[in-house]
Amino acid sequence: MAVNVSRTSGQRGRLWMAALALYVCCWPLSLLHAQGVELSRSDRLAILYTPQLQFAAGGEPLIKIGIVDGVESVRFSASTTVDILPIGPDGPSISVPANTPYTVRISDSEPGTYVHRVVVAELTPSERGTLPDVRELWSQRGYVVQTAEVGSIFAIAGRRFDTRKTLVVLEPAPGLEVAESLAEQLTTEFGIDARVHSELDDYPGCTLTLSGAPSGITITHRDLLFVRGDADTVFTVQDVPFDVGTRNEGTETRRYLGSMYLTADRNGQLAMVNELPIERLLASVVASEIYASSPEDALAAQAVAARSELLTDLGVRHLADPWMTCSDQRCQVYRGLDAEDSRTSAAVEATRGWVLTDGDQIIKAYYSSNNGGFAGSNATTWGEEERTYLRARLDAVEPEGSPFSGGLNDESMVRAFLEEPPESLSAIESFGSGRNFRWTVTMTASELSSAVAQRQDIGRVTDLVVLERDASGRVTRLQIAGTDGELTVERELNVRRTLGGLRSALFVMDIRRDASGTLTSVMLNGGGFGHGVGLCQSGAIGAAERGWSWEAILANYYPDTTLRTLY
């Protein structure tokens, strides 16, 4: 499944001679350019943009993950001698010494060109029969829809897996900003998880210059530099951005294993891409996503969920980027070598290669911090087709016979559930996330009006009315009245954000008014932290503390799925 770059026999011979010349004499790259020995631009960049998997010697997939983008330069060093390969892994190389600070700068850059479409639905092969209904729905709403096929069928060790998705998309937008604005509008208007699907039309381009080598030598190449060490090489990268676009935004030095690619990102700025085996990637991801001191079986369950979530999105998202997945919360958080912990690494190793499947599809293994004792639904949370393993359901130690097992169908039942819940897996005391099992927030009229104004200014808030809840009791439609207008908020995440960033949408409200009837404050009593769909991390800890195995934990949070090994 490695990328096959087609070459004529004459090209292969010239590349071999060029590699030998570089090794013996360290010929300048400009001379290679003059001799015309490079691969085509498309061949070079296909290494980064192909959705096909390559594999490490042990049979596990290699993953390309974007760790830096949107910058003008990157500074790094390596703990061992490394090879600079200007045209990719199969090309000629230049060896540079260890423990030397290098800087790569980008110049003469130009952004790529893309076609941007808004995704209004995402269907698996088994759900494709619903496509006519989806088309009709959007036609009635006044939109013309098209389809885009992403993902692939692949086999590992004789096992067949299917990551194909049919994206139902609108007609191309005139630009990314227009597409993003339309996606936000549709999300608000129809309560779906609309997003932008960008298709690459032409690669971004740039000139990359690496400096810092002994004797002042610089290495310059067009579009791509590949830096390869050995299995133990540690790359130390300075000023890695994190939490970009949030109030916690910053930079820090991080260390990574594997290999590095440097190229232009979609906007023509510098990007650094780390390639490493999936299991080593997961060692950092799992340590970043759950308490490393959690019980072993909770860590193992998290490892399988993270592996499944990563693999099911390969070849489906980030097709317009020079990486397969990103390193922040939009995908799964990856902070490199320093984030690893021996306990989470052991959990990854103990579950090596295991994923959850629904038929031959690796599942969407959503997870969140604390579900408050009731799992959320993927359908009502994101407007997706309902997955049988992601339905709303009571997450109690003994759900059978509970008055809440049929769902939290009205306000009084939600209030009773929050006030006197059954014994729940997520009601833990051993870790801080357990404090989110139940919570109370009080907002003054001024605080509430200010929070709502971040979404839409409707003046001073005068009333709030829950219009709709899903079966998990989460608010999915909220009407807010103000002195200057009215706002209806769709979807649980939008509800949470509009009310100042609530921990979850599983809540009830007590509105307080003065003698004249004017709203003075609102007290919100709620449960859980996050969307509540899929694995509940607090619940996994609670189950493990009760002696549940990681297999039993996964069966609880992803019912009717199958555990299978990839490698």
Image (tube, rainbow, N blue to C red):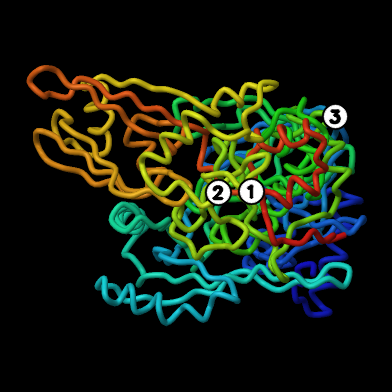
Q: Is residue 119 among the parts visible in the rendering?
A: yes
Residue 55 image point, x, y percent: 83, 60
Nearer the N terminus, badge 1 or badge 2? 1
Q: Secondary structure at mark 1?
A: loop
Question: Could you say which is closer to the camera, residue 144 or residue 39?
Answer: 144
Query: Which residue is painted at 35% across and 72% down in the image?
Result: 171
Query: Which residue is painted at 69% across and 66% down in the image?
Result: 358
Residue 462 to residue 206: above or below: above
Nearer the N terminus, badge 3 or badge 2? 3
Quadrant where the N terminus is found in the figure: bottom right
Mark 3 highlights which residue?
342
Q: Amino acid at mark 3?
A: Ser
Q: Is residue 215 among the parts visible in the rendering?
A: no
Mark pair 3, 2: CA separation: 39 Å
Residue 89 image point, x, y percent: 79, 57
Nearer the N terminus, badge 3 or badge 1? 3
Mark 2 highlights which residue?
405
Q: Secondary structure at mark 2?
A: loop
Do callouts 3 and 2 mark residues in contact (Cβ within 8 Å)?
no
- Left or right of 142 in this view: 270: right
Residue 6 to residue 543: above or below: below
